[in-house]
Image (spheres, grey):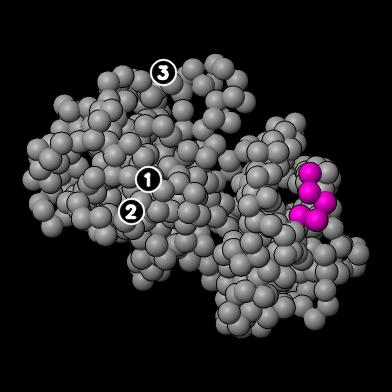
C-alpha cells in the first residue's frame, strides 16, 4: 500500500483546504492542538491540517483527493475515545477529518420510531431531541455531553443501557458512509427486516474509521417509560450480585434496564472526588449494585416490581441493604455517582485500565481470579472494579498503591494487562468490550486472535481501502 512517508507539502494542503474553505481548514498550531490530545493523554499525535467539512459532498471530495494523492485520513468525532483510534500518528503525514459540523438531526419519525442523525450530533442533544418528541434514545454514556453519533457508531459504544436496549450496533438500522474512493454508500433505510444480501452497515459500525467515514445513520427510538425506579443496593459479594441479577431478570424481564456492579474501593474514590457526592447507604458494604427498573405501563408498576425484587432479595439473604430513590433528584444523584467513577480515579494516581467482558455467570469467578493475579504482581494495588454486570462488561481498573510511585506502578502495565487478559481469554471473554481496539490494543488483538479471523479482517480492509489511507495503524 502506497502512503505518504514525508510531510505533506503546502500545495496539497491548499487543495484540501479549498474544499472546505480556509475557515474550516485548521493549520495554526494552537487551533489544531485540541484535536491532537485525547482524554487519557496517552496517544498524542501530529498533523499539519484539520479539515471540518460541512456536508457529505465535501467529505466525498476530501476522500477523492486523499485517494488520488495517497494521503492518510484520520476521522474524528467528539474526541472522547479511550484507545487512541481518533489520533493521528507522529509522522506529520496524516490529515484529521473532524465530523463535528455535520450536526443536523435530519428527521424524527415517531411512527417508525426512528431518527436520522448526522455523525456530528452530540449524543446528549440526540437524547434531548428524542425526549422532546416523546421518545427515548437509550444509548447513555458518561461522555454523552461531548461524544458524537459518528464516534459512537464507529466504536460500537455500549454504556449503561445495553442490558435492555443493546449497544450502538443493535440501535442502528442504516448508515450513510463515504468510502475511501469518495463514493457515497447511502443505506439510510428504516427497515427492521431486510434479508437482501450481506448486512454491509455492520461492517462500518465498530470499524473505528478504518473502512469509511460514517456521515449519518438511522437509529432506533423507543417509547418513553411511564415509570422508572432506581435503587442502590449493598451486598456482601459478586456472587450475591449475580443471584440478585437473576432474580431481577426473572421478575422484571425486559423492564430491568440497568444493573451496575460497583466495588466499595471505587465507590470510595467517587465519594472523595465527585462534588457533592454522598454515600447512598448508611451502612458500608464491600459491593454495591445500582439497579434500574422501568415500566411501560405505569409508575406504580415500576415501584411495585422493584420493591418485590428487593424484598425477595432481603428474605433470601442476598441483599444486605437497599435504598430506593425517593425522588428524581436522588435518582439522578445515584446515577451521577456511578457515571463519575471513571474520572474519580484520576486524582488517585496512576491507573492500569481494562475494558473486558466475560459471560455474565463468570463475573464472580473473574473478579476472584483477577484479584489474585493482580496481588501477585503488586500486593498493595487498589482494584477499582465497576461496570455493566448485566451484560458481563467490567471496567477492571487498577490504581496505584496509596502514596506510591506513579511511574514505577505504570511500568507494571504490560504484566498487569497480560495477567488480566489471560484470565479473560480462559473464560472466552473479550479484551475490549466497548472502548474498541484503536492503537492501544492493536498488537494484542493481532497476537492473540485466531489467525483466520485476523486474515478475514485484513481481506475486508483491503477490499474497502486498497490504498490504505483510512485511519492507518488502527485495529489491524
Q: Position of residue 95 (x, y in %)?
A: 26, 41
Per the rendering, the mark at residue 45 is: 1
The main secondary structure of the magenta stretch is loop
Viewer-nearest residue: 30 or 344: 30
Left or right of 354, for residue 5: left
Q: Which contiguous range is marked in magenta?
A: 377-381
Q: Earlier in the sequence, mark 3 or mark 2?
A: 2
Q: Quadrant of residue 228?
A: bottom right
Rendered position, 63 above or below 258:
above
Cα gap from disc 3 to disc 2, whole angstroms: 30 Å
Instruction: Say whether residue 185 is visible.
Output: no
Q: Secondary structure beneath disc 1?
A: loop
Callout 3: few (<14), some (14-19), or many (20+) C-alpha neighbours within 10 Å?
A: few
| Residue linked to disc 2 | 35
Identified at 72% across, 70% down, the residue is 268
Q: Position of residue 415 (x, y in %)?
A: 70, 38
Per the rendering, the mark at residue 355 is: none
| Residue linked to disc 3 | 459
Left or right of 161, for residue 320: right
Viewer-nearest residue: 379 or 315: 379
Amino acid at each position: 500500500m502506497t502512503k505518504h512517508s514525508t510531510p505533506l507539502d503546502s500545495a496539497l494542503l491548499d487543495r484540501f483546504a479549498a474544499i472546505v474553505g480556509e475557515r474550516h481548514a485548521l493549520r495554526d498550531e494552537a487551533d489544531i492542538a485540541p484535536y491532537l490530545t485525547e482524554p487519557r493523554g496517552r496517544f498524542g499525535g501530529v498533523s499539519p491540517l484539520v479539515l471540518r467539512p460541512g456536508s457529505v459532498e465535501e467529505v466525498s471530495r476530501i476522500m477523492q483527493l486523499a485517494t488520488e494523492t495517497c494521503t492518510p485520513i484520520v476521522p474524528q468525532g467528539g474526541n472522547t475515545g479511550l484507545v487512541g483510534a481518533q489520533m493521528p500518528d507522529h509522522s506529520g503525514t496524516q490529515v484529521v477529518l473532524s465530523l463535528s459540523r455535520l450536526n443536523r438531526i435530519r428527521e424524527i419519525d415517531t411512527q417508525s420510531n426512528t431518527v436520522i442523525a448526522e455523525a456530528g450530533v452530540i449524543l446528549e442533544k440526540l437524547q434531548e431531541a428524542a425526549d422532546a418528541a416523546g421518545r427515548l434514545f437509550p444509548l447513555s454514556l458518561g461522555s454523552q455531553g461531548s461524544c458524537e453519533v459518528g464516534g459512537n457508531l464507529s466504536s460500537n459504544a455500549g454504556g449503561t443501557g445495553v442490558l435492555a436496549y443493546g449497544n450502538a450496533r443493535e440501535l442502528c438500522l442504516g448508515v450513510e458512509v463515504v468510502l475511501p474512493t469518495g463514493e457515497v454508500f447511502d443505506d439510510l433505510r428504516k427497515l427492521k427486516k431486510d434479508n437482501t444480501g450481506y448486512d454491509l452497515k455492520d461492517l462500518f459500525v465498530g470499524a473505528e474509521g478504518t473502512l469509511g467515514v460514517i456521515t449519518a445513520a438511522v437509529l432506533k427510538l423507543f417509547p418513553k417509560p411511564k415509570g422508572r425506579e432506581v435503587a442502590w443496593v449493598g451486598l456482601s459479594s459478586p456472587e450475591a450480585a449475580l443471584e440478585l441479577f437473576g432474580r431481577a431478570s426473572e421478575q422484571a424481564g425486559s423492564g430491568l434496564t440497568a444493573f451496575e456492579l460497583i466495588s466499595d474501593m471505587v465507590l470510595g474514590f467517587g465519594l472523595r472526588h465527585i462534588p457533592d457526592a454522598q454515600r447512598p447507604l448508611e451502612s458500608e458494604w464491600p459491593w454495591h449494585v445500582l439497579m434500574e427498573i422501568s415500566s411501560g405501563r405505569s409508575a406504580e408498576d415500576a415501584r411495585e416490581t422493584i420493591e418485590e425484587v428487593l424484598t425477595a432479595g432481603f428474605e433470601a439473604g442476598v441483599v444486605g441493604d437497599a435504598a430506593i430513590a425517593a425522588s428524581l433528584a436522588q435518582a439522578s444523584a445515584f446515577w451521577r455517582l456511578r457515571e463519575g467513577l471513571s474520572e474519580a480515579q484520576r486524582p488517585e494516581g496512576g491507573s492500569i485500565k481494562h475494558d473486558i467482558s466475560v459471560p455474565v455467570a463468570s463475573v464472580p469467578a473473574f473478579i476472584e481470579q483477577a484479584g489474585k493475579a493482580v496481588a501477585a504482581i503488586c500486593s498493595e494495588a487498589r482494584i477499582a472494579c465497576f461496570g455493566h454486570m448485566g451484560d458481563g462488561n467490567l471496567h477492571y481498573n487498577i490504581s496505584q498503591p496509596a502514596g506510591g510511585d506513579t511511574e514505577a506502578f505504570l511500568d507494571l502495565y504490560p504484566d498487569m494487562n497480560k495477567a488480566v487478559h489471560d484470565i479473560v481469554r480462559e473464560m472466552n471473554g473479550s479484551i475490549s468490550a466497548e472502548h474498541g481496539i484503536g492503537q492501544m490494543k492493536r498488537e494484542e488483538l493481532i497476537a492473540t486472535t485466531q489467525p483466520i479471523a485476523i486474515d478475514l479482517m485484513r481481506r475486508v480492509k483491503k477490499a474497502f481501502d486498497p490504498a490504505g489511507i483510512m485511519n492507518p495503524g488502527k485495529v489491524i
